[in-house]
Amino acid sequence: MSSQDFVRSLPQWNRLGGPRRLVRVHLDPWLLLLLLSVIGFGLVVLYSALEQNQAAFNTQLMRLGLALVVMLVAAQLEPRFFLRWSPWFYVLGIGLLVLVLFMGVSVKGAQRWLDLPGLPRFQPSELLKLAVPMTIAWYLNDRPLPPRFRYLCVALLILALPSMLIAMQPDLGTAILVTAAGLTVIFLAGLQWRWILGAGAVAMAALPALWMAMHDYQRQRVLTLFDPERDPLGAGWNIIQSKTAIGSGGLTGKGLFQGTQSHLDFLPESQTDFIIAVVAEELGLIGISVLLLLYLLIIARCLYIATHAPSTFGRLVAGAVTLTFFVYVFVNIAMVAGLLPVVGVPLPLISYGGTSAITLLAGFGILMSIHTHRGW
Amino acid sequence: MNTQRQIKDPSAEQRQFSARALLLLLLVLLAFAGLFARMFQLQVLEYDLYQTRSDKNRIQVRPVAPPRGLIFDRNGELLAENRPVFTLSIVGERVGNLPQRLEELAELIDLSDREIENFVERYQRRRRPFEPIPLKTVLSEEEIARLAVNRFRLPGVEVEAQLVRHYPQGPMMAHAIGSVRRISEADLPRLDASRYSGTQFVGRQGVEQYYENTLHGQVGYEKVEIDARGRVRKVLETQPPTAGRNIRLHLDSRLQRAATAALGDRRGAIVALDPSSGGVLAMVSTPSYDPNLFVTGMSQAQYRTLTESRLTPMFNRAINGRYAPGSTIKPAIGLAGISLGKTDWQRTMNDRGWFQLPGQQRIYRDWSWRPGNAGGQGITDLNRAIYRSSNVYFYELASRMDIDDLSGFLAQFGLGQATAADIPQQGRGVLPNREWKRQTRNEPWYPGDNLNISIGQGDMLVTPLQLATMTAVIANRGNWVRPRMLASAEDPLVELDLAEDPAPVEGPSAADWERMVDAMADVVHRGDRGYQQNGTAWFHIGRNIAYRMAGKSGTAQVVEIRQGERYDEDELSEFERKHAWFIAFAPADDPQIALAVIVENGGGGSSVAGPVARAVIDAYLTPQIAKR
């Protein structure tokens, strides 16, 4: 089985000359096309949000180029490779997180970055976004599913350790993403409904305790969400301005480069976390719809890949990557639109910055690897 | 069963996974539908709301303050102008390391602890993002240059220019023209909100207050697109402001300078008028203050020194100081006696140095009285009573007059009234009569009160401006021109609706006026005849004089000298000593200038105030005499 390239024998690929070559280099043409569409769309909006700053734009181009190379490389590796190395990624990630606690670099009061000699400054928590779901998938791969209670506990432990370390930095956004990715794996592994519902009930009951445990600034963000006007120049400023940007875009938008909220600096973080408001302001509901549709198609394609994966590991990892991507999109847009508290989650593949793009495209690379190596 | 369960069932797991994946897909679709619905709500349903908000954010109608009208003196010298002042502000969001930036700034410019303290306090308060917080309000040229050179390494540090009032003559003109002050809460009700929307200062006191409407001008507007930092990105529409109109005053800076110098560091006031036009040529009140401090700001300590000093530099003595006129009132009393038929130029009496009312013990003294009831001016007529300043002559005259008649006559000289046309907050003084005394003291009028009034003591109070006005009326032989500051303006002024001049003084004939002027000229010029025969001021100012001056000295008591006590200068503290007065006009037959001088607690009128008056008139007439 493993020696035979199953994919190449599929008839529909043989009919098309181009995609067959892409398949030989282990790339999924549909997913690639959709990703490039979103990236292209994002670059146009970013060019506007960056005030047409060529230097910054070039930096972003290089980052995205690098991320695409990472995806390309990941797609070439066999799923077996990921299966074997998952726990070691995980161990490495945990080690780096502990290192961050002791010698991390503080930015704006949160200790998230690691500045090791010889390496560019990076956030180890980023690594965990992939390592956690992969390791849980690795752990469950050999075990019968739905998982028994014992296995479930181990899986939850694998998840809880890094989530807590990340939340301690504190980096709520990333902790949520990592937890979501891990829980997705467990959910997709077929966790019984009674446990899901039970956990949900416990979580609801624990909300007050969570509220007490939150940092002041985090509580502020939640309160601001419910009533931005209570502090219009302080914590509410971001939400009020982003809603104003979105709403004033209307159906067709103010036109590319014409957004007043973003270009007159009323909209904070317009190049990073709040860039969706620039899309809404300049391209209107139509632009938003196009982008949402592209995201939806990516998620659909990924779920298709996940359901067609031949191994438990493949299925679970693919499903987790997909859902991480979804959580990114949803949390970011809902936050900017004033539906969720402000947490530092970028809009995937569009926000200025390279870290999340590299992680996400590496994940998509793994998906492509799973899909194009179905022979093993 | 356990063992069965432990065996993996790939196809069952596959089905299970597919079911779950489908569930996730549904969840995703639902979530996306939710996002779309939210966007639809914001962008379509609530579009109008946010569109308005966005425009309100970026479009601002900004008032543009009009430049305030300039004030010139009669020779075209600038008394009040507008000057750019540079303010240093810091934008917290862009400044980076604040303590370090403040340290760097302190090396470049002069920063006081108080400035830093104020700044930190304002900085810590909640504020709009990117709002610039002022750190130093007035930068010197040198500091601006140094900041400009270092601009590149000072992010978040901004320098903004603003036109503010500047008084190039500083303290010298402060009391004459007044000044502008920062608009306060208390001013708001009486200021037109839209007209003053761009204005930070309003005229307070003096010409600046009286001609506020003319000087202020019309506000302009600018519709601008601003960014979140409040910076203007684009000007969409403009309606330029109309500058305030320039005005020219009667004031003569050179005379003002001479008058200020003549008073020196003594406390006092001088008001000099042009008798033909009523124009105020000089108005000095010392000590004074620098009006520029109120524009550019001063420290608490500086302000406290100004307001709490016993020397009261903020107090305009020239128009608000209330003093007993002393003997300077005698020419008017004499004219009253003539007009009321109580005396004439021939009538004489024997001044033995003291006076008693019939049936009363109390002794009213002459200034020349000596112990043992010695002294006095001897046989005295009205002319001699003026040039020797005989108290006894006027006691005797007043004892025969009715106070209401006397008071009514004196009122014709503007005493007890505010007669200046365009001087706000001018004092009215006190011109007592029976009615006044009953109302304020609930006492009847006593014959002794007449005697006090006749030598300018008792309840009578005047301002230097009032005495200068009275002097001008005498110089004009009874004809009136209201004192005024404004000489001319570019256009007819809103405020130029000055009250009509009062009617000429009724009573004295033309000959009476001339004889009174002659008597006043004798005060200055009658000399070299022995002490008893000389004018009281001759020795001090009457020698080597190139023109004919008419004057009258006065010495006003500050504390009451009780019966039998002696006035001993050394025993009294500085603030209890007598005030020295001198009123004068010149040339006596063609008056160009009439003035009143007071030196607070200065002592004798002739010896102390007289030379000041002479110096001022010299400064005004000498260039004119030289021209002829």
Image: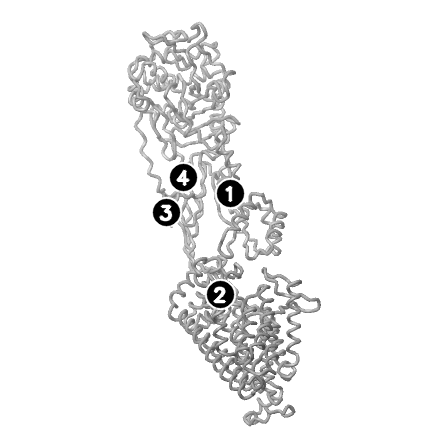
Q: Chain of mark 3?
A: B
> Same subunit under labels 4 and 3?
yes
Q: Is residue A308 left or right of residue B503?
A: right
Report the residue at 55% width, 71% height from top: A177
What residue did someone put label 4 on?
B209
Residue B23's disc is none
* SS state under label 3: loop
The image shows residue A14 at horizontal and vertical percentages of 57, 94
Report the residue at 59% width, 88% height from top: A374
* SS state under label 4: helix
What residue did someone put label 2 on?
A207
Q: Amino acid at mark 1?
A: Thr
Q: Nearer the viewer, mark 4 or mark 2?
A: 2
Q: Few, some or many C-alpha atoms within 10 Å of disc 2 (few <14, some 14-19, many ≥20)?
A: few
Q: Chain of mark 2?
A: A
Residue B192's disc is 3
Q: Few, some or many C-alpha atoms within 10 Å of disc 1 (few <14, some 14-19, many ≥20)?
A: some
Give above or below for A343 relative to B203.
below
Q: In this view of the protein, which residue sits in the foreground, A144 or B351?
A: A144
Please say whether residue A154 is visible from this viewpoint. yes
Q: Nearer the viewer, mark 2 or mark 3?
A: 2
